Image (tube, rainbow, N blue to C red):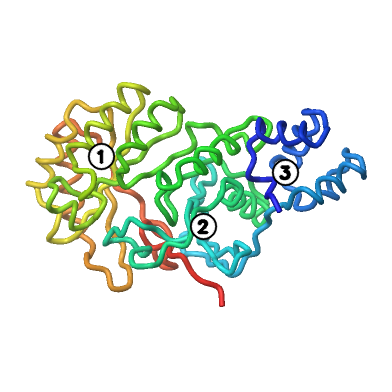
């Protein structure tokens, strides 16, 4: 049966027309799903009983079960969700002074094989649909009785490897008659699927684009991130420059600092040369430990030296606050889990 949450509002109106219903009825259902966050058609009290029965026969409403919920000492919360097909995904809720940020997954597993990420080596199962992505937000809002204000596509999976569903999820999240989360409060991270960066630029959305860079030479980056064997740093930078010229929006480059690998001042010098003149920001990430991980965290002293060198040479750089590492909810620590 079709998951009604897989449809953006325009698509849902077309579905209702096919059912012989007026398009405004689709708006009513959309508001029930995303503004009121109902979990059954029977709760949609301004719809006729006949229409509710018709919807039950045509659609399902994806509603996740919480398998496990963990809370970090810093208040970060990690959810393990049953996605109703014998698989499970993880989603993270972070609390800031400016509101709540959720880190959503876009795939069950990941194909990218980044050596510093816990999803590495876990078999890719499938893409999440748009509705399955959005349900992560809805499920957390129901559980915590809160309103999410920021969404980051930085959980399990490569968002641009599931491009169409991620784009549709953004449309649902951003819609003023639904979740109404502003595009500037939505961030999408990619390991560097160059063709999709061009596509995303041409969408001319106001979302933030984050690029997982992590190294300044092709040799080092390919060792950390196999995607670099397909799309080199040079190709990636050309795509980023196109994105900036097309959107006039700043790119956030993510750079995970690993001991004795990519943390030297020479690395910092190459990074300055690589990014000079670009509208960008560098987000330095103290690399997080994972099982059988190849890399270890750089020292705080080296991280600060790296940051200071970038800032002193015209590249705005900050160090990402470490959240949720004690419950394996920090950057790179999320995994796909199977249900038995």
The image quadrant of residue 331 is: bottom left
* Mark 3 neighbour density, 10 Å: few (under 14) some (14–19) many (20 or more): many
Q: Which percent across, then down, holds residue 15?
A: 72, 36
Per the image, label 1 sits on a secondary structure element best described as strand
Q: Can you identify the residue that label 3 sits on?
A: 33
Q: Which percent across, then down, holds residue 309?
A: 14, 41
Residue drawn where x is 68% and y is 51% of the image: 145
* In front: label 1 or label 2: 2
Decide which of tag 2 and tag 3 comes sooner along the chain. 3
Decide which of tag 1 and tag 2 comes sooner along the chain. 2
Which quarter shows the C terminus?
Answer: bottom right
Decide which of tag 3 and tag 1 comes sooner along the chain. 3
Residue 66 horizontal side relative to residue 99, left or right = right
Q: Can you identify the residue that label 1 sits on?
A: 317
Front-most of residues 98 and 325? 325
**What label does residue 91 carry, if any?**
2
* In front: label 3 or label 1: 3
Label 3, label 1: how many angstroms apart (C-alpha)?
39 Å
Residue drawn where x is 48% and y is 64% of the image: 72
Vertical side of 208 occupied by 256: above or below: below
Residue drawn where x is 20% and y is 44% of the image: 307
Q: Which percent across, then down, holds residue 175?
A: 62, 32
Front-most of residues 143 and 248? 248
**What label does residue 205 carry, if any?**
none
Label 2, label 3: how many angstroms apart (C-alpha)?
20 Å
Front-most of residues 277 and 131? 131
Per the image, label 2 sits on a secondary structure element best described as strand
């Amino acid at each position: 049966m079709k998951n009604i949450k897989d449809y953006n509002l325009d698509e849902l109106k077309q579905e209702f027309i096919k059912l012989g219903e007026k398009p405004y009825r689709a708006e009513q259902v959309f508001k029930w799903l995303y503004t009121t966050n109902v979990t059954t058609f029977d709760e949609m009290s301004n719809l006729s009983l006949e229409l509710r029965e018709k919807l039950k026969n045509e659609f399902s409403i994806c509603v996740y079960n919480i398998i496990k919920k963990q809370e970090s000492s810093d208040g970060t919360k990690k959810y393990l969700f049953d996605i109703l097909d014998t698989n499970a995904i993880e989603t993270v809720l972070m609390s800031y002074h400016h509101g709540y940020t959720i880190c959503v997954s876009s795939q069950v597993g990941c194909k990218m094989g980044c050596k510093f990420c816990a999803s590495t080596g876990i078999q890719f199962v499938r893409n999440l649909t748009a509705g399955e992505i959005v349900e992560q937000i809805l499920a957390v809002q129901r559980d915590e009785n809160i309103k999410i204000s920021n969404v980051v596509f930085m959980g399990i999976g490569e968002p641009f490897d599931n491009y169409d569903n991620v784009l549709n999820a953004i449309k649902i999240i951003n819609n003023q008659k639904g979740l109404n989360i502003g595009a500037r409060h939505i961030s999408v991270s990619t390991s560097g699927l160059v063709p999709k960066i061009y596509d995303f630029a041409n969408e001319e959305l106001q979302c933030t684009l984050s690029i997982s860079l992590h190294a300044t030479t092709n040799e080092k980056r390919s060792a950390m991130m196999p995607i670099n064997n397909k799309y080199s740093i040079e190709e990636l930078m050309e795509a980023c420059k196109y994105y900036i010229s097309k959107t006039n929006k700043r790119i956030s480059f993510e750079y995970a600092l690993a001991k004795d690998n990519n943390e030297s001042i020479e690395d910092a010098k190459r990074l300055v040369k690589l990014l000079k003149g670009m509208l960008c920001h560098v987000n330095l990430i103290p690399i997080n430990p994972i099982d059988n991980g190849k890399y270890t965290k750089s020292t705080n002293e080296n991280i600060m030296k790296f940051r200071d060198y970038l800032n002193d040479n015209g590249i705005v750089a900050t160090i990402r606050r470490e959240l949720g590492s004690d419950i394996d909810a920090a950057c790179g620590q999320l995994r796909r889990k199977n249900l038995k």
